[in-house]
Image (cartoon, rainbow, N blue to C red):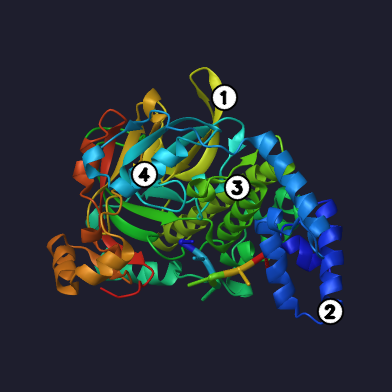
Amino acid sequence: MNGKHITKLGFERKAIGLALAAATAREGAGVERGEILDELRAVQKNPAAYLAGGVYAELAAELGAQNALNDSRQGVALRPAPLPYGVWGADLIEPGARAQMDVAMRLPVTRAGALMPDAHVGYGLPIGGVLATDNAVIPYGVGVDIGCSMRLSVFPVRPDALKVEEARRLLLRHTRFGAGVAFEKREREDHAVLHEATWDSQPLLGHLRDKAAAQIGSSGSGNHFAEFGTLTLSSADLGLEAGTYLALLSHSGSRGFGAQVAGHFTGLAERLHPNLDPAAKKLAWLSLDAEEGQAYWQAMNLAGRYALANHELIHARLARALGVNVLASVHNSHNLAWKQQVGGQQLIVHRKGATPAARGQLGLIPGSMADPGFVVRGRGHADALASASHGAGRQLGRKAAANTLVKKEVTAYLKQRGVTLIGGGIDEAPQAYKRIGDVLERQNDLVDVVAQFMPRVVRMDSGSQDI
DNA sequence: ATGTCC
């Protein structure tokens, strides 16, 4: 047992020494390390129960004092009722997602919020949730896949000039999917984001730098995809004439790097709020006045830039393989927090599966693997905190989709729309998603449609059950 | 979302 074991449990300042002393005493009494660690966790969870006496009494007293200090500083009581918030497409949103948003609107740090029409249940804040807080950032208000984002490239190529077989070959050769997937050293591509000084600013980031370098330019699993399709512009926009174009659309995030940053900081936030109402446990926040909050903010923004760099490498590789230059491109992050003016005050606006939609801002809202996606322009709706949905949103959870959808029906849906799929799981089937037309209709005061993108050849990771 | 505990 050493200081590393203790600090890993989250003990801080004077509690580190006291925990170490108690652990050493227990070791001397012949207790196994695993059991001692369990005891330390129990003391941490409920210090009051150990105050009366015994080897952990001093530690319990110190933890109690630290908790009281944290509580008085940060305020852990929830409001008795949620602050009011706007809901777009209430008829499309399951009660569980509303209940999660209600809890978020009761946090003492919350000032405003909104729920987008693609909303569904997530960890902590629902997917499709927008939450504005005062000087505090909530790691699970951003989500596990920090910086998850979209990118569209439009090519100077007629859509039918790229044959299905060729598109398949290009995607298979130039994209890489799957949890844990990385590139061998000789295959790796470089990017300026890997050389930022930010990596040296925190031990955690320094530790994750190699993983980030190995995974840059890859696409991950779940709902991530890269697809060739047809972009239709009914009138001139994006610097392009009206017409149809070959385009590439990708959905990708910050891979293992971002996931580990999210896990580290949400754990830290939970430990800093031991007395937070259990209903809001996954909404534990970090104050931006504290070192921890500043460290998360720095790591989160690095993960955001890293995720966008992933897209850049994927698009550059495919454009190179096609032998063309990109005519126009659009990108946006939809899992991130921003400093934003809300009602004359600067707040921290978390978007967890929500597209930034300030007035005039371009964004991308995909439909499903076999339904159209849309290039949109924000209308800057104040009550939506200048946001929109980030897609169609799930109407079936992964398990429900795997249990209820039939492979034959999914294949028929793809065939009917002329979509070729590489990989993809039944849990990502179009039928597992809300109808994108319904979702767009519910937010026509949040965004205007600029162009439509119909997928033709789609690559995803293989899910639990293939299609 | 991630090889599901740095």
Element on which disc 3 rests: helix
Earlier in the chain: of badge 2 and badge 3, it is 2
Label 2 or label 4, whichever comes before in sequence order: 2
- How far apart are labels 3 and 1 at the CA level? 19 Å
User: In the rendered view, does A261 fall on the left or right side of A112?
Assistant: right
Of the residues under marks 1 and 4, which one precedes in the sequence? 4
> Is residue A381 in sight in this rendering?
no
Residue identifier under label 1: A346
* Residue depicted at x 57% and y 65%: A215
Residue A240 vertical placement versus A43 (above, below): above
x, y percent for residue A330: 41, 42
**Residue type at mark 3?**
Met
Residue at 63% in and 57% down: A264
In front: label 2 or label 4: 2
Q: Circle 4 is placed at which residue position?
A: A99
Q: Earlier in the sequence, mark 3 or mark 1?
A: 3
- Residue that appears at 50% across and 55% down: A145
| Mark 1–mark 4 distance (CA, rounded to whole Å) | 27 Å
Q: Secondary structure at mark 4?
A: helix
* Amino acid at dot 1: Gln
Residue A352 lies in quadrant: top left
